[in-house]
């Protein structure tokens, strides 16, 4: 019983640290062109976006989630948004919803060597 509780705790702990969540993860849609969910910025916190993916696997909508985000820098928000819109791709398929929803969390990496 103790092992089962420990296993469940570890499983849910890692699920809480996930950078991608929502229906996309629930439906097990694979990423074909991954991105780094970390940006080399000096701010502390996180930037959260609500995304929508079409049946071709392209991110068609990337909306800044102001209530969930703690970084407010316009420059960093646009850098993260461009990274998601231009590089992130998912598997194609008509079996997925037309506007598949998800949430992405971008976290900072402190720049070193400056």
Image (cartoon, grey):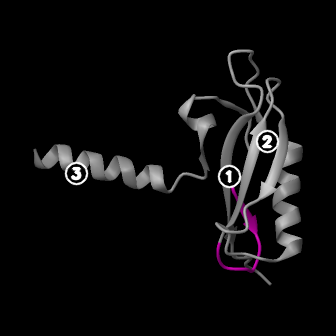
Identify the mark nearer the N-term, 1 or 3.
Answer: 3
Closer to viewer: mark 1 or mark 3: 1
Q: Position of residue 46 (x, y in %)?
A: 66, 69
Write down the residue under mark 3. Answer: 6
- Label 1 neighbourhood size at 10 Å, few (<14), some (14-19), many (20+)? many
Give 57 or 110, whichever is nearer the viewer.
57
Q: Position of residue 40 (x, y in %)?
A: 76, 69
| Left or right placement of residue 87 versus residue 91 in this view | right
Identify the mark nearer the N-term, 3 or 2.
Answer: 3
Q: How many marks?
A: 3
- Snapshot quadrant of residue 63: bottom right
Which element carries disc 1, helix, strand or loop? strand
Above or below, 63 relative to 67 = above
Q: Spatial distance from mark 1 to mark 3, Cα to Cα?
A: 27 Å
Tell me which segment is drawn in magenta. 37-45
Is label 1 in contact with label 3 (beta carbons under 8 Å)? Answer: no
**Image point (60%, 36%), residue name:** 23
Which element carries disc 2, helix, strand or loop? loop
- Label 2 neighbourhood size at 10 Å, few (<14), some (14-19), many (20+)? some
- Label 3 neighbourhood size at 10 Å, few (<14), some (14-19), many (20+)? few
Write down the residue under mark 1. Answer: 104
Which element carries disc 3, helix, strand or loop? helix
| Left or right placement of residue 101 versus residue 23 in this view | right
Write down the residue under mark 2. Answer: 88
Identify the mark nearer the N-term, 2 or 1.
Answer: 2
């Amino acid at each position: 019983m103790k092992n089962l509780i420990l296993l469940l705790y570890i499983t849910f702990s890692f699920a809480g640290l996930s950078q991608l969540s929502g229906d996309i993860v629930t439906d097990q849609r694979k990423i074909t062109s991954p991105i780094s969910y970390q940006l080399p910025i000096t701010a502390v916190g996180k930037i959260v976006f609500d995304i929508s993916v079409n049946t071709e696997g392209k991110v068609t909508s990337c909306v800044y989630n102001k209530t969930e985000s703690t970084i407010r820098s316009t420059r960093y928000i646009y850098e993260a948004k461009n990274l998601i819109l231009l590089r992130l791709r998912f598997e194609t398929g008509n079996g997925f919803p037309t506007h598949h929803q998800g949430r992405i969390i971008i976290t900072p990496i402190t720049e070193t060597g400056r």
